[in-house]
Image: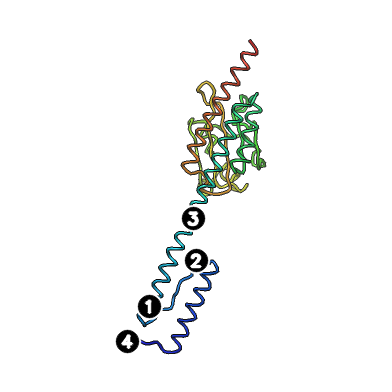
């Protein structure tokens, strides 16, 4: 049968001890890397590494599940707070101010702003905002390349999930320089006509997944409903 000389044996034994020690200390990527010509020890290598693979996969799945649960909790918190505000807001100004605050506090976004087209400049001018607002120095043309402009023009949720990959331009360069890496524009309507946008920025590329986009579409519809309600109430008070 195969044998190991003393030097090879010591190398293998040290590798086994170091690997087991590292694995036990939390390094789930640790593996036995020194082969053995002895069948029983080779099988031990294989069994240890297979066990390590399974434990690492299980740990990764648990981490993924935990992140998913945290993400669902964040989205639920955002939607719940938005719905409470929609019911309780007594003015458009209060509604939009609270929506922006909720986006930061409950949604985890870096910047939130709501804007409407200015009749004089014909630009999407921020009306309310929360978060890192230094970026909001200028309005945006409704036909421009930003998610806000695209959402306003198309009437649909518009997302840029990797600002760095967007074609260079004033909006892209300014947003990237401000530290933003993803952004989404959500159209806001009154009487079924798009009148403005809710725009959200994040500092992480790929922040807006399919679940998030569906939720934001729902949020946009809820805000639009609230705008119609507040407008109708204001009209009744005038009458």
Relative to 209, is 149 above or below?
A: above
User: Which residue position holds label 4?
Assistant: 1
Question: In the picture, residue 142 is in which quadrant?
Answer: top right
Which residue is under mark 2? 28
- The residue carrying mark 1 is 42
Mark 3 lies on a secondary structure that is: helix
Q: Residue at x 43, y 78 (%)?
A: 34
Instruction: Tell which circle, 4 or 1, labels the residue nearer the N-terminal end.
Output: 4
**Mark positioned earlier in the residue sequence (1 or 3):** 1
Name the residue carrying label 3: 62
Q: What distance separates the C-alpha of mark 4 from that of mark 3?
A: 43 Å
70, 197: nearer the viewer: 70
Residue 127 appears left or right of 168: right
Residue at point 52%, 51% (across, down):
66
Give the colour scheme shown.
rainbow
Task: Give the percent coordinates (x, y) of residue 233.
Answer: 61, 17
């Amino acid at each position: 049968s195969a044998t190991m000389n003393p030097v090879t044996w010591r190398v293998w034994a040290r590798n086994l001890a170091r690997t087991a020690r590292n694995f036990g200390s939390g390094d789930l990527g640790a593996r036995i890397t020194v082969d053995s010509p002895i069948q029983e020890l080779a099988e031990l290598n294989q069994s240890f590494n297979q066990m390590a693979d399974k434990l690492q996969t299980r740990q990764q799945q648990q981490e993924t599940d935990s992140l998913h649960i945290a993400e669902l909790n964040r989205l639920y918190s955002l939607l719940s707070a938005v719905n409470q505000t929609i019911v309780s807001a007594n003015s458009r100004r209060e509604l939009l101010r609270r929506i922006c605050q909720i986006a930061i506090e409950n949604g985890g976004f870096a910047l939130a702003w709501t804007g409407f087209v200015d009749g004089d400049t014909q630009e999407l001018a921020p009306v309310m905002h929360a978060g890192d607002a230094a970026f909001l120095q200028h309005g945006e043309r409704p036909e421009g390349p930003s998610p806000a402009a695209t959402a306003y023009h198309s009437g649909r949720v518009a997302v840029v999930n990797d600002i760095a990959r967007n074609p260079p331009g004033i909006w892209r360069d300014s947003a990237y320089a401000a530290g933003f890496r993803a952004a989404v524009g959500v159209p806001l309507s009154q009487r079924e006509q798009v009148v403005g946008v809710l725009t959200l920025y994040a500092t992480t590329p790929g922040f807006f997944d399919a679940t998030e986009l569906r939720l934001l579409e729902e949020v946009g519809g809820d805000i639009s409903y609230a705008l119609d309600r507040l407008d109708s109430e204001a009209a009744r008070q005038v009458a």
